[in-house]
Image (cartoon, helix red, strand yellow):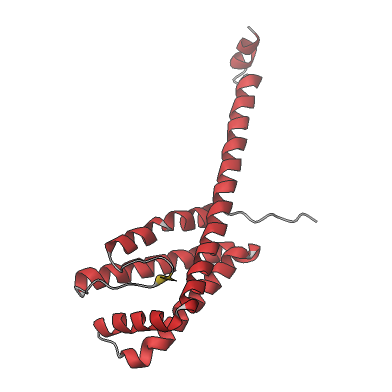
Amino acid sequence: MGNDVFMAAGQSAPSEVFHASRRRRVSALVLKWLVRLSRFGLAALFLFTAGAKLVIVRAFAANVAELLSASGFNYQTWMWPITIAVIVAEVITALLLLLPRTVRIGALCSALLLIGFASYALYYVYVLHGEPLECGCFGGIIGSQLGVKTALRNLALLIPAILVFIGYQRARVVS
């Protein structure tokens, strides 16, 4: 009978409001933690991959040279600039993800890097019909051949990048 009064007035019963608001709070909390996990996970991933590439920078540069050569570019001219650009882009992306003011820019950069890496992997396999090549994505620590598997992995990593881009909300300072 108590809830009938609220229904007649066009309002929800207090217990229904409590459950709905509790569900919203739990959902918001879960989203907040998923965004944090995705943000710091992506930053760690990019720092790890950049560091691993630095450890074997000559071997990574040789892989880049092979890819450039297969694509018809002068690998002697572009090998080191591309190698350095990839490593620097990964470090900058990680730093952008770690700094609160630039998290969304970092998420966007990570998505662009992942799309670029995946696109080139597919281009190498399907357009250039390239031979299987160790991509050096994780340095010499984790073996990974450039191809469909690499592209799918990078595209799957778009999920946390998009989650961070959409879900991150910087704390507002009220004065």
Q: Residue furthest right?
A: 175
Q: Residue furthest front?
A: 141
Could you tell me which quadrant the C terminus lies in?
bottom right
Residue 28 rendering spot, x and y as whole percentages: 59, 41
**Which quarter of the picture shows residue 61?**
bottom left
Q: In this view of the protein, which residue sits in the foreground, 59 or 100?
A: 59
Q: Residue at x 54, y 66 (%)?
A: 105
Judge whether 68 appears above or below 159 on screen: below
Q: Is residue 116 left or right of residue 49?
A: left
Q: Residue at x 42, y 84 (%)?
A: 58
Residue 9 rendering spot, x and y as whole percentages: 62, 17
Residue 107 rendering spot, x and y as whole percentages: 51, 62
Q: Residue at x 20, y 72 (%)?
A: 127
**Which quarter of the picture shows residue 86?**
bottom left
Residue 97 rendering spot, x and y as whole percentages: 57, 64
Residue 12 appears in the figure: no
Judge whether 20 appears above or below 101 on screen: above
